[in-house]
Amino acid sequence: MTEVLQLRSGQADVVRKALERTISGGGVAVFPSDGLYGLACDPLDAEAIAKIHRLKGRDDGKPSAVMYFSPLAIRELVAGFGPRTKAAVSALMPGPVTLVVANPHRRYPLACRQDPERLGIRLIGGPLAGTMCPVFQTSANLSGEPAPARFEDVPAAIRDGADLAIDGGVLPGLPSTVVDITALEEDGGWRVLRDGALSPGDLASKLAAVGLG
């Protein structure tokens, strides 16, 4: 049976611990991201990832981002980046962005899928900030359907199939802006792969402020 929790004032610590317990135990969680509801599991757990794909009816060849909720948790990953990539992470995260970074050490291959040397990463704030486990994350929708901004709009089959479902109320409803920075160390180049919550102007301004305009 799915454990359902509501994010209420003063209850965030209970919810964070439940999320960490679910992920570390091999489970799947519905959770509120910074824009839309998502599905999460351990990014190194092939069975849990396969369960997410079954719930969504999703092509398991598609890559997904690895999401962090704590700067401390992402610190080891960032330590291996080049100086320009570190500057971009510092300028844009936490925030409504997904950064596609060079991944020469092929970390999190189950999230990268067919392109193991490119990895999407996220770092978000909000009430779940401080959760220490990274997660494989994708939107909590049936494949081809809109991603939900309200808990009530998460398909019942997905809510009922998850081990934990976190009701965070109504979310802004915008996906993250996806930015490819894999060429940043080589030539300083970056490009937007998907428009989203961070406007092109704000994105360019933030990167220019750290010398990456």
Image (cartoon, rainbow, N blue to C red):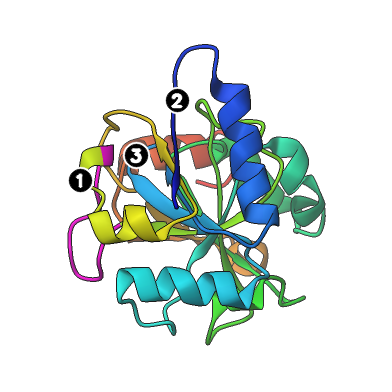
Q: As displayed, is residue 115 above or below residue 171?
A: below
Residue 200 visible somewhere in the drawing: yes
Q: CA distance from mark 3 to mark 1?
A: 14 Å
Give the labeled residue for mark 2. 7
Q: Nearer the viewer, residue 128 or 118?
A: 128
> In the drawing, does residue 29 fall left or right of residue 156?
right
Residue drawn at the location 73% of the way across and 76% of the way down: 104
Residue 175, percent across and down? Answer: 32, 48
First along the sequence among labels 2 and 3: 2
Q: Nearer the viewer, residue 174 or 177?
A: 174
Instruction: Estimate how packed mark 1 is, as few (under 14), some (14 to 19) or many (20 or more) residues with alpha carbons within 10 Å.
Output: some
Q: Nearer the viewer, mark 3 or mark 1?
A: 1
Give the labeled residue for mark 3. 35
Residue 70, percent across and down? Answer: 67, 37
Residue pushed farthest front? 1
Q: Amino acid at mark 2?
A: Leu
Residue 69 visible somewhere in the drawing: no
Residue drawn at the location 57% of the way across and 39% of the way down: 93
Q: Amino acid at mark 3?
A: Gly
Q: Secondary structure at mark 1?
A: helix
Q: Amino acid at mark 1?
A: Asp
Q: Does the magenta portion include 145?
A: yes
Instruction: Estimate how packed mark 2 is, as few (under 14), some (14 to 19) or many (20 or more) residues with alpha carbons within 10 Å.
Output: some
Highlighted range, magenta: 141-151
Q: CA distance from mark 2 to mark 3?
A: 15 Å
Q: As displayed, is residue 203 above or below residue 147?
A: above
Residue drawn at the location 35% of the way across and 69% of the way down: 55
Residue drawn at the location 67% of the way across and 46% of the way down: 21
Q: Nearer the viewer, mark 2 or mark 3?
A: 2
